[in-house]
Amino acid sequence: MTSRIALITGATAGIGEATARLLAKNNFRLILCGRRGDRLKALQDELTSTTAVTTLTFDVTKRAQVSKAIQSLPPEWQDIDVLINNAGGAHGLDPIQNGSVDDWDAMIDVNVKGLLYISHAVIPIMVAKNRGHIVNLGSIAGREVYANGNVYCASKFAVDALSRAMRIDLNASAIKVTQVNPGLVETEFALVRFKGNKERASQPYKGLEPLRGDDIADLILFALTRPPHVVVADMVVFPVAQASATVVKREG
């Protein structure tokens, strides 16, 4: 069987990077996407001994860049089977009356518009061949609002709605749509949210063992390797110390 081509956004760190490594070991060819070309090159060099890898350096929030990048793929890479919409992020943690409009724009641009732009570029490829699999990275923040999460939560609620809508709209084309909704995962996520403040970024994970990027990659691989008639539509995953967006048991 020909190995499937998987395009991963946000592949330069965290869940995206972990997923790239795991899929490489499981007979997927990889299109690794991100803004940081040096990291993409390093990951490509690491994985090319295991599978075929190509990279696309662009910003998912820039519609013209997205379109140009997908159109630039050589013929042997154009038949994309799997789209993993992993790029995303949180910016700031403020009550809505004090929130930064720039932060709001950044979250809506990457979490909502970025997902839409790349999906709009890739989905027609899947529709044309009547098969494919889309994995959207959501969050428990897309199910439960928490204090000071306002716009980040709203953007992830939008991901939840878009995942459900995709599944309906693409039903006739036999395209699978999976959403993975993690709780606390220790990646660069908090470092971005707190503008590089390492002390603040470490706080959400203190006193517990959080999820890792590898844990989420395992779930993505599970969803991608179900039989053709099976779709894992939706997953919520927590570390054992977490029971909801706001209920977390901490030691010490």
Image (cartoon, rainbow, N blue to C red):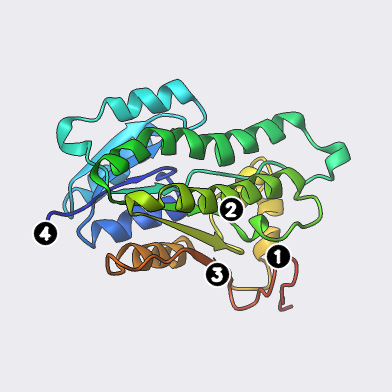
Q: Earlier in the sequence, mark 3 or mark 4?
A: 4
117 relative to 73 in the view: left or right: right
- Which quadrant of the figure has residue 195? top right
Marks 4 and 2, how far apart in space?
A: 33 Å
Whether residue 14 can be seen here: no
Amino acid carrying label 2: it is Asp
Badge 4: residue crowd in 10 Å (few <14, some 14–19, many ≥20): few
Q: State the residue lying farthest toward the left.
A: 1
Q: Position of residue 122 (x, y in %)?
A: 35, 37
Question: What amino acid is at disc 1?
Answer: Ala
> What's under tag 4, amino acid-wise?
Met
Q: Which residue is labeled 1 in the image? A: 245
| Residue to which mark 3 is pinned | 237
Q: Quadrant of the N terminus?
A: bottom left
Amino acid tagged 3: Val
**x, y (%) of residue 108?**
63, 36
Q: Secondary structure at mark 2?
A: helix
Label 2, on which residue?
160
Badge 4 is on which residue? 1
Distance Cα–Cα, label 1 vs label 3 = 11 Å
